Image: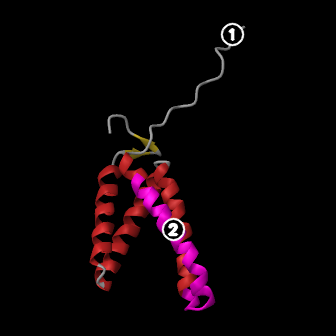
Amino acid sequence: MEKSQGPTPEPEYPDPPTGIWIICGLGLIGAVLSLLAAPLYLAEGPAVVGVILVVSSVVQLAVLWGLLLLRPWAYLVAMVFYAVGGFVDLVAGAILGAVVSFLVLGYVASVSHEVKAGKWEAGG
């Protein structure tokens, strides 16, 4: 009869890089502000804008959570959204917004290669 050595310890996953924490914190603020603004558009402005704000905020919150959990899909979706957002800002003349979007895109792209199967690679 074999003796049990106690409970099997859970595998340890490293924390996301500090830059991802900062991006997620600022993204959370933006998503919450968008959710707060959405009812104004739904009530008085073009309703489609309010719906877009709600949907994009919910997607943003899911992606931010995925980034914190180091999910590969979240890095891909974040890169697509920041690239599209950067180009939209550029076309709209919001240069600062475009610069911020492209800086975040660059950072996420620079660390995304270290995310594999939902785990942060050692030595990264």
First in sequence: mark 1 vs mark 2: 1
Q: Is residue 9 above or below residue 4?
A: below
Q: Which residue is mark 2?
A: 31
Q: Describe residue 82's horizontal placement relative to residue 44 as left or right.
A: left
Residue 55 visible at all: no
Q: Main secondary structure of the magenta part?
A: helix
Q: Is residue 61 above or below residue 116?
A: below
| Residue ID at (61%, 86%) | 42
Gap in angstroms between the C-alphas marked 1 and 2 = 53 Å
What is the crowding at mark 2: few (fewer than 14 residues within 10 Å), some, or many (at least 20)? many
Q: Where does the magenta region start and end?
A: 22-48
x and y, in percent, of residue 58 in the image: 56, 68
Between 45 and 59, the one nearer to me in the picture: 45
Between 12 and 44, the one nearer to me in the picture: 44
Q: Describe residue 78's horizontal placement relative to residue 92 as left or right.
A: right
Q: Which residue is mark 1?
A: 2
| Residue ID at (50%, 48%) | 69
| Residue ID at (41%, 60%) | 76
Based on the picture, tell me whether residue 5 belongs to the magenta stretch.
no
Residue 31 visible at all: yes
Which amino acid type is marked by label 1?
Answer: Glu
x and y, in percent, of residue 84 in the image: 36, 74
